[in-house]
Image: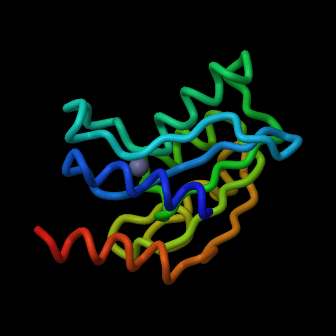
Amino acid sequence: MRRALAEAGRAASAGDVPVGAVVLGPDGTGLATAHNEREATGDPTAHAEILALRRAAEAHGEWRLTGCTLVVTLEPCTMCAGALVQSRIARVVYGARDEKAGAAGSLWDVVRDRRLNHRPEVIAGVLERECAEQLTAFFRTL
Ligand SMILES: [Zn+2]
């Protein structure tokens, strides 16, 4: 999560909301990192999780991220939760809860929906205060 926080810090320079993600392989080694790049790229889907999943799949050599873990500073939205299910990732770890748009336990729980064929383990609230403070500090400057 410390790596994800550092990655999130890189988003703010382009005016992007500071969200950072890291994907770890089954053996715990880092496969990919990414930060939110919506403003930087003009791409509405350029959330940290989507970019990290793409880069991890490229490094991993296939789209199935079986056994991998995604660590992200903010609870994933519906789009990212859907992508996480599609990637077959084993575990999702997040820091700050997103009561307004979170799809991993707050507003929705897409990643653990029993109607879907894949449900990653979810570990919430890791370094929650630091993750929330990074976001609060960014929005305070706007
Ligand atoms: Zn998202």
Residue 2 is left or right of residue 5, and the answer is: right
Q: Is residue 50 above or below residue 35?
A: above
Residue 49 is left or right of residue 119, and the answer is: left
Image coloring type: rainbow
What residue sits 47% from the left and 34% below the top?
A: 51
Residue 89 is left or right of residue 131, and the answer is: right
> Residue 59 at what x, y percent from top left?
68, 22
User: Who is closer to the viewer here, 120 or 139?
Assistant: 139
User: Who is closer to the viewer here, 98 or 52?
Assistant: 52
Counting the numbered discs, the total is 0
Q: Residue furthest right?
A: 27
Q: Is residue 84 above or below residue 93?
A: above
Q: Classify the position of the N terminus by image quarter.
A: bottom right
Tell me which corner region of the image, top left, top right, bottom left or bottom right, holds residue 126.
bottom right
User: Who is closer to the viewer here, 2 or 100?
Assistant: 2
Tell me which corner region of the image, top left, top right, bottom left or bottom right, holds residue 61.
top right
Q: Classify the position of the C terminus by image quarter.
A: bottom left
> Residue 60 at what x, y percent from top left?
73, 23
What residue sits 39% from the left and 57% below the top?
A: 9
What residue sits 57% from the left and 27% below the top?
A: 55
Residue 34 is left or right of residue 42, and the answer is: right
Q: Is residue 93 above or below residue 83?
A: below
What residue sits 33% from the left and 70% below the top?
A: 135
> Residue 114 at what x, y percent from top left?
69, 56
Q: Residue furthest bottom?
A: 129
Q: Is residue 83 above or below residue 109?
A: above
Q: Residue furthest left?
A: 142
